[in-house]
Amino acid sequence: FRSSRAALVATTDNPVDSLEWIERSEAVFGKGFWRPTWRPDAFLHLSPSPLAPKRWIDWVEDLGRVVGEDLKGRFRAFLDALAARHAFFASRGCRASDYGVAIPAGQTIPFAPANSIFDKACRRESIAPAEALDFQAYLMRYSMDLDFEKGWVSQIHFGPARNLRRVATDHGGLDSGC
């Protein structure tokens, strides 16, 4: 990386990631060379790719373990947990977010309907496509409001082609881009 004269390298990281690699990279490259990027896609999509190694509820459970709370059926606690992780990312040098959505959904959704959809998803009930888009819109706006409060850059990828081939996810990991 040094030979390429890069001044900064940013990765994309899930809100449950420990970011422990930041400390390890500082020993080699110095403070601020490697920075995480907030990528909450796993929480935006109630129906992830069939190739994804985890379902949406698995990510909610992982987030609960990271923050030490049971978040299932507790939408406000879920949002607070995301906000706490967002603050943690900021403390580790994060200054940008990255969102990947198949369909743009920017409509304003009140808390109550989003809460209802969250509860249904936590109970593993069927979610209508329109509900999934409403939930995505609510959560993306919530997360982007956190970005705005911290002065972060927000990047949105509409229609990214990810997790389409088993060989790519097996070798490159989830969201490797193939």
Image (cartoon, rainbow, N blue to C red):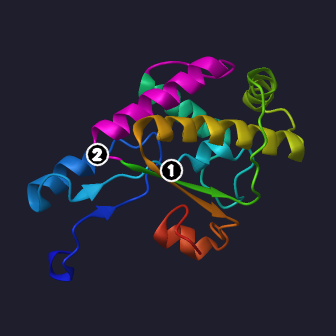
Q: Residue at x 41, y 37 (%)?
A: 150
**Nearer mark to the viewer, of 2 and 1:** 2
Quadrant where the N terminus sits is bottom left
Q: Which residues are magenta?
A: 68-94
Please name the amino acid that badge 2 sits on. Answer: Gly
Q: Name the disc covering residue 93, or none.
A: 2
Q: Is residue 55 left or right of residue 132?
A: left
Quadrant assignment, res 4: bottom left
Judged from the image, the secondary structure of the residue bearing numbered disc 2 is: loop
Residue matched to label 1: 39
Q: Of marks 2 and 1, which one's residue comes earlier in the chain?
A: 1
Nearer-the-camera pick, 63 or 82: 82
Q: Is residue 107 above or below residue 73?
A: below
Q: Is residue 65 above or below residue 37?
A: above
Nearer-the-camera pick, 170 or 88: 88
Q: Position of residue 83 (x, y in %)?
A: 48, 29
Q: Name the disc covering residue 10, or none.
A: none
Q: Position of residue 162 (x, y in %)?
A: 63, 67
Q: Is residue 36 left or right of residue 67?
A: left
Number of residue marks: 2
Outermost residue toward the bottom?
3
Q: Residue at x 66, y 22 (%)?
A: 75
Q: Residue at x 77, y 36 (%)?
A: 108
The chief SS type of the magenta part is: helix
Within-10-Å neighbours for mark 2: few <14, some 14–19, many 20+: some
Q: Position of residue 120 (x, y in %)?
A: 81, 28
Quadrant assignment, res 103: bottom right
Judged from the image, the secondary structure of the residue bearing numbered disc 1 is: loop
Query: Does the stretch in magenta take in 54?
Result: no
Quadrant assignment, res 156: bottom right
Q: Residue at x 69, y 47 (%)?
A: 45
